[in-house]
Image (tube, rainbow, N blue to C red):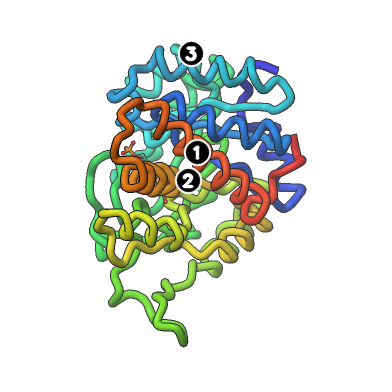
Amino acid sequence: MGLVTSTEMFKKAYDGGYAIGAFNVNNMEIIQGITEAAGELNAPLILQVSKGARNYANHTYLLKLVEAAVEENPNIPICLHLDHGDTFELCKDCIDGGFTSVMIDASSKSFEDNIALTKQVVEYAHDKGVVVEAELGTLAGVEDEVKVAAGDASYTKPEEVEEFVEKTGCDSLAIAIGTSHGAFKFTPEQCTRDENGILVPPPLRFDVLEECIKRLPGFPIVLHGSSSVPQEFVAEVNKYGGNMPDAIGIPEDQLREAAKLAVCKINIDSDIRLAITASVRKHFAEHPEHFDPREYLKPARQAVKDMVARKMINVLGCDGKA
Ligand code: G3H
Ligand code: 13P
Ligand code: ZN
């Protein structure tokens, strides 16, 4: 099938009431774990590469690994996306370098400057058949190595979305409705506790989402910061020598609800990191004599695959939709 843009995927996802998983990739095992799950489940897929991933693994290595995954999984459409591009030059590099989709994240700029930079990227990208995701509103957590404190996060203003989309020509829009990057999305003070004492995060702002949908009918919405931070991974990390107290994510039932609405792309990175770290920590605790990386990376890759498969079936609803 070759690499594709997300246009067709989003159209089907919007009409079908499900979302495409956009998973961050940094190395071969992560790419294999995700694409094996998608291939077996017949699920359309977005693999996304951040600036940090490019710095870590190198553009060409990641591109070639993704191309290998495409060849190994001819039954599913795969889109290769730049996550959180922060400059025109970075977006251009990825557009010229084989990506089929880029995000220009100018959400920290003024409304006018966000429009101007996004428009510049859209014009260049569309000319080359590449699609563009933009962002309005600011998520808490870490974006492009910049830590945004919870207090500095701001929800997307629905009254701005029509003008933004019309003036920029972007193909999808990431909005801020209370999700957050990383594995510590909320402080215990921001949460309540259920009858078992488990932290319950503040609910997503579905009112903001619905207001955006009303103003942009048929337009694909993106949610960043959407790892659910499965507590079984956190418990395993902590059991085997890790230290991640109060790690907490977005409840999966809320993501499922969003996927039924106009949310067509749901970004997941931290859950991959957690699946790998939990697996590797357990492996070393149980096999202190092992030193062949294949011995601990094989179960780690399987843990990524199992997590992604669960997510596709239970949260995204994209299984069987290729
Ligand atoms: O949104 C950020 C993604 O989780 C990528 O993180 O910049 O550390 O690769 P990174
Ligand atoms: P998480 O940190 O919740 O996995 O979010 C990832 C993300 O939004 C990548 O752009
Ligand atoms: Zn993000």
First in sequence, mark 1 or 2: give its number. 1
- The Cα atoms of the two marked residues, 2 and 3, are separated by 22 Å
| Image height of 268 relative to 73, above or below | below
- Residue 286: image x %, image y %? 36, 46
Q: Secondary structure at mark 2?
A: strand
Query: Which amino acid, by three-letter code, is at mark 3?
Result: Lys
What residue sits 51% from the left and 44% below the top?
Answer: 173
**From the image, which quarter does the N terminus lie in?**
top right
- Is the shortest distance between ligand 2 and the CB of mark 1 under 8 Å? no
Q: State left or right for residue 198 relative to residue 45.
A: left
Can I make out residue 286 in this image? yes
Q: Tell whether 84 sits left or right of 258.
A: left
Camera-side residue of 117 and 142: 142
Q: In the drawing, what numbered circle is on residue 64? A: 3
The residue sitting at 38% across, 36% down in the picture is 84
Q: Nearer the viewer, residue 296 or 95?
A: 296
Q: Give the mark count.
A: 3
Quadrant containing the C terminus is top right
Is the distance from the Cβ of mark 2 to the nearest ligand 2 atom less than 8 Å? Answer: yes
- From mark 1 to mark 2, how far is it between C-alphas? 5 Å
Residue 80, horizontal then vertical, whole percent: 53, 25
Q: Are marks 1 and 2 in contact (CB under 8 Å)?
A: yes
Q: Which residue is painted at 70% across and 20% down in the image? A: 74
- Mark 1, Cα crowd under 10 Å, few <14 / some 14-19 / many 20+, is many
